[in-house]
């Protein structure tokens, strides 16, 4: 049976070039990059080259790149490495659990967190970040691209707020890597985290941009690796693979691959929306920009977006966007769409499509096994039933027209079948 993998936001396969780049570093060039002999120096040279590639990818100095084990470590490092008892932390209610659970942890040590909620379109309003600031705010952390909806957050505007107010700014850019051109100077962040396996690199490897002079405590201590910022013998094959993936990602952003991907995603989306009782989560600004659902996450406070925006920021806000809502789509990562299907149980649809050879995800794949509806969709104001009846399609950058055709054949059949046997659709539910 043909299989089409449309769950790239969960993970991606290595590209052949990445595999080839890594291959020598498992056996022939296995040295420890800290050793002074030739074997060690081969590993060190490979790491130096990889660091230069990542510096180009982030647009920073080589010395501002810290290799680590991936997105969770980067997110945790930003929070545990910067916050102290009595500090205030601002993040959003749509972050990955690597941020949300870390915020829970520091709450036990006297750090207060404000969770800013998105608008119904999935966008965070920078004016809400500004309103959440307190004299004791030390860190803001906002994701670049949401893993479930693909919605791109206005990080540049938030970076300006951080700069104006002297607050540290971390970006979880795990889902933006390879989909959006990076420039940490333009983003205005002090810290930024990426993960190789979301961009056709190996699992268990990532990197962090750490702006020079940022007083971050290392999460792991021991050897003096990574300029004492991250102890542990470096994963040289993983780092080489990450750098190759980053190099290929930079090409894809230039050579039209990502534009082609956006067109494929749009065709997929338009095709799926032909099915009655469907809609996109986080694509267009809805007519009603009213308050989203509750975002009672963790132990901190939550904020709902309010109308209005600091005009100095020039940032999108509910009141600004209201005038161009239906003609202006919300910016999204090129590969992602999140679609609700009324009268369908999302998990049943995932399984039914899997049986027909299509891999997609309901809610966030990082939480698979959890039965609670997606916290992201709930924060955007969806009711539980609609959040549960939502699927995420996230295309690999190698996706083809034939893949989309196949999925467009499978989805309507699966939805029709499930609706036919659904007590909800039949109106017989208790
Ligand atoms: N941040 C975001 C937005 C993610 O989507 C993920 C993984 O899905 C992570 C962080 C965690 O990354 P990793 O799997 O490398 O630990």
Image (cartoon, rainbow, N blue to C red):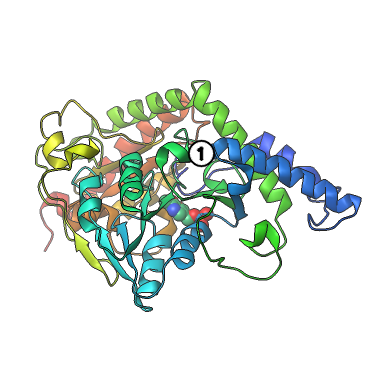
Expressed as whole percent of the image width and height from the top left, the position of residue 312 reads: 21, 38
The reply to whether residue 29 is visible in this rendering is no
- Count residues near mark 1 (Cα–Cα under 10 Å), then give few for <14, some for 14-19, many for 20+: some
State left or right for residue 197 relative to residue 48. Answer: left
Q: Position of residue 238 (x, y in %)?
A: 67, 50
Q: Is residue 256 above or below residue 152?
A: above
Kindly identify the residue that appears in the image at 81 percent across and 44 percent down. 24
Residue at 28% from the left image edge and 54% from the top image edge: 376
Residue extending furthest toward the right: 37
Quadrant containing the C terminus is: bottom left
Q: Name the side, left or right, on which 213 lies relative to 46.
A: left
From the viewer's perspective, tell me whether residue 272 is left or right of residue 98: left
Tell which of 183 and 17 is nearer to you.
Answer: 183
Which residue is at 41% across, 43% downward? Answer: 188
Count of numbered badges drawn on the protein: 1
Residue linked to disc 1: 3
Q: Which residue lies at the image location 80% right of the left edge and 57% below the top edge?
A: 32
Comparing 73 with 355, the one in front is: 73
Residue 165 percent location from the top left of the image:
31, 52
Which residue is more in the foreground, 388 or 211? 211
Quarter of the view holding residue 102: bottom left
Q: Is mark 1 within 8 Å of ligand 1?
A: no
**Secondary structure beneath label 1:** loop
- Looking at the image, residue 10 sits to the left or right of residue 421; the answer is right
Residue 314 in sight from this viewpoint: yes
Q: Position of residue 394 (x, y in %)?
A: 41, 40
| Above/below status of 92 relative to 108 | above
């Amino acid at each position: 049976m043909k299989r089409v993998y449309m769950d790239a936001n969960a993970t991606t396969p290595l590209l052949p070039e990445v595999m080839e780049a890594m291959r020598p570093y498992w056996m022939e060039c296995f040295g420890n990059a800290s050793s002074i002999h030739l074997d060690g120096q081969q590993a060190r040279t490979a790491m130096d080259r990889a660091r230069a590639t990542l510096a180009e990818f982030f647009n920073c100095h080589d010395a501002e790149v810290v290799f680590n084990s991936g997105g969770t470590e980067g997110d945790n490092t930003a929070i545990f490495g910067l916050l102290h008892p009595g500090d205030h932390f601002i993040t959003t209610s749509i972050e990955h659990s690597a941020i949300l659970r870390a915020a829970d942890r520091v709450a036990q040590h006297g750090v207060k967190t404000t969770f800013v909620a998105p608008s119904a379109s999935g966008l965070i309003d920078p004016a809400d970040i500004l309103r959440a600031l307190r004299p004791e705010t030390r860190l803001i952390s906002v994701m670049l691209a949401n893993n479930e909806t693909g919605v791109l957050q206005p990080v540049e505007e938030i970076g300006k707020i951080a700069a104006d107010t002297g607050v540290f700014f971390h970006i979880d850019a795990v889902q933006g890597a390879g989909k959006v051109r990076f420039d940490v100077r333009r983003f205005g962040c002090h810290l930024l985290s990426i993960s190789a396996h979301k961009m056709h690199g190996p699992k268990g490897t990532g990197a962090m941009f750490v702006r020079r002079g940022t007083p971050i405590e290392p999460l792991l201590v021991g050897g003096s690796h990574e300029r004492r910022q991250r102890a542990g013998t470096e994963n040289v094959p993983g780092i080489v693979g990450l750098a190759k993936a980053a190099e290929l990602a930079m090409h894809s952003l230039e050579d039209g691959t990502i534009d082609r991907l956006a067109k494929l995603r749009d065709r997929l989306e338009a095709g799926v929306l032909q099915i009655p009782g469907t809609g996109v989560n986080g694509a267009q600004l809805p007519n009603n920009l009213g308050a989203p659902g509750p975002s009672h996450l963790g132990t901190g406070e939550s904020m709902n977006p309010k109308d209005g925006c600091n005009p100095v920021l020039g940032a999108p806000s509910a009141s600004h966007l209201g005038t161009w809502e239906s003609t202006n789509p919300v910016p999204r990562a090129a590969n992602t769409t999140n679609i609700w299907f009324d009268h369908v149980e999302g998990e049943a649809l995932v399984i039914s499509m899997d049986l027909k050879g299509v891999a997609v995800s309901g809610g966030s794949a990082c939480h698979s096994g959890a039965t609670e509806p997606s916290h992201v969709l709930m924060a955007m104001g969806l009711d539980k039933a609609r959040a549960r009846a939502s699927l995420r399609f996230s295309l690999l950058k190698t996706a083809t027209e034939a893949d989309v055709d196949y999925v467009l054949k499978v989805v309507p059949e699966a939805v029709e079948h499930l609706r036919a046997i659904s007590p909800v659709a039949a109106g017989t539910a208790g």
